[in-house]
Amino acid sequence: MLAELAPWSVLELRLHRLLRAAGLTGWVTNHRLLLGPRWVYVDVAFPDFRVAIEADGREHHSQAADFEGDRARWNLLAADGWIVLRVSWAMVQEGHGVIAQLRAALARRS
């Protein structure tokens, strides 16, 4: 499997499985974007729709620098016109709400 297709965390792996089970296509993982002067990565992106999903685990986001960096990245995405959905472990485990919100975001961009 190519590194670009591999999830970078267990939470992302579960999110990928959820998207596949829902029959969703057109998404890429670890999507690299140049936003202004900065390169950023999006956990899951639907580039044709400019919809991103960020999987937020508590462990990674407990450090101040990671927390602040994520907000700066999300602001860059929003300023560039992306819809950013943030999902947690519990949300991915439940699944249906994530898929419903994602389908609604994609429909807004169709």
Image (spheres, helix red, strand yellow):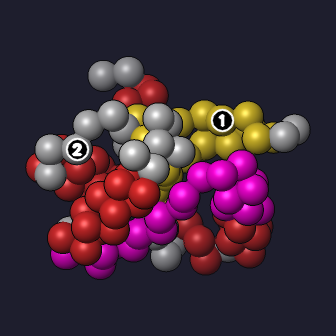
Above or below, 5 relative to 46: above
Task: Name which residue lies at 23% across and 50% down.
Answer: 19
Please tell me which of labels 2 and 1 falls first in the chain.
2
Residue topped by disc 1: 33
Q: Where residue 43 sits: x, y (%)?
A: 48, 48
Q: Give the number of marks.
A: 2
SS under mark 2: loop
Q: CA distance from mark 2 to mark 1?
A: 22 Å
Residue at 36%, 38% in the rendered image = 27
Where 42 falls versus 108 (above or below)?
above
Amino acid type of the residue tagged 2 in the rendering: Leu
Q: Which residues are magenta?
A: 72-94
Q: On residue 24, which mark appears?
A: 2
- Tell me if residue 50 can be seen: yes
**Where 7 falls versus 81 (above or below)?**
above
- Badge 2: residue crowd in 10 Å (few <14, some 14–19, many ≥20): few
Q: Which residue is at the front of the view, 19 or 59?
A: 19
Q: Nearer the viewer, residue 81 or 73?
A: 81
**Amino acid, disc 1:** Leu
Check residue 73 for magenta coloring.
Answer: yes
Q: Is residue 14 left or right of residue 42?
A: left
Q: Residue 33 lies in what quarter of the image? A: top right
Residue 29, visible in the rendered structure: no
Picture coordinates of residue 70 (x, y %)? 67, 63
Whether tag 2 and tag 1 are in contact, CB under 8 A, the answer is no
Q: Is residue 36 left or right of residue 5?
A: right
Task: In the displayed orientation, state which residue is furthest to the top.
Answer: 2
Q: Which residue does the image show at 66% across and 52% down from the upper left? A: 81
- Does residue 25 appear left or right of residue 70 in this picture? left
- The spot of residue 32 in percent (x, y) is 60, 34
